[in-house]
Amino acid sequence: MNVLVVNCGSSSLKFQLINSDTEAVAAKGLCERIGIDGRLVYQPAGGEKEITEAPMPTHTEAISMVLDALVNEKTGVLKSLDEVEAIGHRVLHGGAKITESRVINDEVISVIEECCDLGPLHNPANLMGIRACMKLMPGKPNVAVFDTAFHQTMPPKAYRYAIPTQYYEKYGVRKYGFHGTSHSFVSKETIKFLGLDPDNSKVIVCHLGNGSSISAVKNSKCVDTSMGLTPLEGLLMGTRSGDLDPAVVEYICKKENIDVSEMLRILNKESGVYALSNGLSSDFRDLEEAVEKGNEAAALALDAFSYRVAKYVGSYAAAMNGVDAIAFTGGIGENGDVVRAQVLGYLGYLGIKIDEEKNKMRGENFVLSTPDSKVLVAVIPTNEELAICRETVELVTK
């Protein structure tokens, strides 16, 4: 089955066409600057990247250009759009109502609309992509794979905030968690790769990238995760502050004479390792290079990041009363041997031992703990597009 996987942002659209039988990517690409001037980057498997500059006033024009590229006589990979059998959409927020991937119908669209308050940057864009695909490929099944769904197995003790119940009941203020597609994919792959029992296992997934989150997965179900109502809670990240005393917001607003919206923008866009490195970079490769040259602020940023990750891993080992395996994924988790070594350096009390040579590997599934380590530690590259493809096929072939 050919599945078109679509991931819409407010002014961008990533796509992959995947053959679900072989799980091979037939073509992939990106639409940028939607609503501005428009740019399509398209690459068939084994071929060169093609760049097309053209107006894309809305996501409908962007999807239309993608579909034209897929059936283009010269570099297209399909004879006709009839060969696209289903479309899988990444959707940010499904709230508490949607706990799994769903075939899109009016009810699902209504829930996505209701959750626009909780995901104001993403949910409206996700809806635009869904409506564009429905318009341009009528009759084809569309599936929504929600970033929040995997975490909806958390118990109330993990997801409720200790604030008046009325805010939970009236506005749904609680922890939802994000990166769920990645956490679901990587936890399953970890269990399979390490030969663990899906019904009797304790896995901690560290999805570390510019946006970072951690999940505790007990018996294949998420029991806790680090992101909250929004992706701002939890680890410090590329430009996000992560956990913070809420009183800091009012304090700085008063001192700087700014409003809460501006303060939240600062916490989302100008904080994290970017802030701790004194504005040097939010890219961990730049920080590691600066550390080698003796930059103390960059060293603090890396140390603080790794320290926060280790604290969360330790707390989740406690929450599950043990841990069988820790999986690193995401851009930093998969490629950042320095960060992995720093994080694991705090976890010797769990009986973790690391093979320093194996820790330098990247780009594939591998175990970096030693045979006598009491906890297995592995790097498991995430593949959210493949996860969306698998979920889509499962639902449309039921």
Image: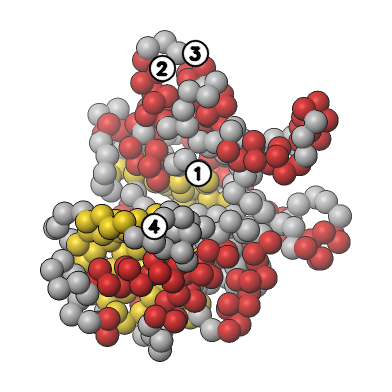
The label on residue 38 is 4
The kind of residue tagged 2 is Val
Chain-order first, disc 1 or disc 4: 4
Count neighbours of disc 3 (C-alpha within 10 A) and say few if under 14, some if 14 to 19, many if 20 or more: few
Q: Earlier in the sequence, mark 4 or mark 3?
A: 4
Gap between marks 2 and 3 measured at Cα: 7 Å
Q: Residue at label 2? A: 291
* In front: label 1 or label 4: 4
Whether label 1 touches label 2, CB < 8 Å: no
Give the labeled residue for mark 1: 211
The residue wearing badge 3 is 296
Residue 372, given in percent of the width and then of the height, sits at: 33, 36
Q: Residue at x 45, y 75 (%)?
A: 132
Question: Looking at numbered disc 4 in the image, what kind of residue is underneath it?
Answer: Gly
Write the residue at 30% across / 27% down. 356
Callout 3 secondary element: helix
First in residue order: circle 1 vs circle 3: 1
Looking at the rendered image, the quarter that the C terminus falls into is bottom left
Please name the residue shown 86% across and 55% down the image.
164
